[in-house]
Image: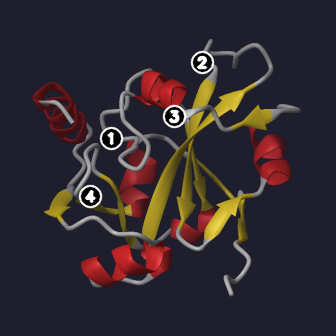
Amino acid sequence: MTDTAIARFDADAASRGLRVDVVERPAANSLEEAAGLLGIEPGDIVKTLVVKRHDGASSTGRSYLLALVPGGRSIAWKKLRTVVGVNKLSMPDAATALEASGYERGTITPIGATGDLPVYADERILGRRVALGAGRHGASAFVDADALIAAYEATVADITDEEPARS
């Protein structure tokens, strides 16, 4: 992450009155390992995923949105399509996600994201302190989920399904 992106992250959090604690951490190879390094439950890690709309663009002219997905869960495409009000959504490739959000995959966060993307949050993050991308590798941003939702006027709904257990 460039100094410009760090400044963008910090300035956006400050302008929204959002208290964010950024914690440096070693790289992790799994959600469970990341949670262990941070001393939290896997469900308290929130992935921020860039999603492409396929309806031409929203009424605001934006073709992308951000989905906040708690650890151990994945986007339930049918549910998210219903909430967004479109027939087709997809995950863009890494280069497109970077272009849309200003952040690399694995670091994406609504805080300081470029493009003023609408945010859709899974209802399971309500009332929790969560860790999400901090806009750079090797760091996590801890934030009150309710404050994050309010700061970004996020749409809150049931938009995920439990991931199948790994064997």
Say which amino acid is labelled 4. Ala
| Residue tagged 2 | 62
Would you say the residues marked 1 and 4 are in contact, meaning their CB atoms lie under 8 Å apart?
A: yes
Please tell me which of labels 3 and 4 falls first in the chain: 3
Q: Alpha-carbon distance for marks 3 and 4?
A: 21 Å
Instruction: Judge the density around disc 4: few (<14), some (14-19), many (≥20) Cα neighbours within 10 Å.
Output: many
Q: From this view, report whether residue 18 is shown above or below residue 101.
A: below
Q: Amino acid at mark 2?
A: Arg
Q: Which residue is mark 1?
A: 111
Q: Which mark is residue 141?
A: 4
Front of the two marks 3 and 2: 3
Give the mark nearer the N terminus: 1 vs 2. 2
Residue 39 drawn at (x, y percent):
28, 84
Which tag, 1 or 3, sits closer to the chain's start?
Answer: 3
Q: Secondary structure at mark 1?
A: loop
In whole angstroms, how far apart are the C-alphas of marks 1 and 3?
19 Å
Measured as percent of width and height from the top left, residue 154 is found at 53, 44
* Residue 19, image quadrant: bottom left
The tag earlier along the polypeptide, 1 or 4, is: 1
Residue 41, image quadrant: bottom left
Q: Earlier in the sequence, mark 3 or mark 2?
A: 2
Between the residue at mark 3 and the residue at mark 2, the CA separation in whole angstroms equals: 18 Å
Residue 128 position in % (x across, y down): 42, 73
Q: How many other residues sit within 10 Å of disc 2, few (<14), some (14-19) or many (≥20)?
A: some
Q: Secondary structure at mark 2?
A: loop
Residue at numbered disc 3: 94
x 36%, y 34%: residue = 103
Label 3: few (<14), some (14–19) or many (≥20) C-alpha neighbours in 10 Å: some
For image coordinates 84% across by 32% down, the residue present is 88
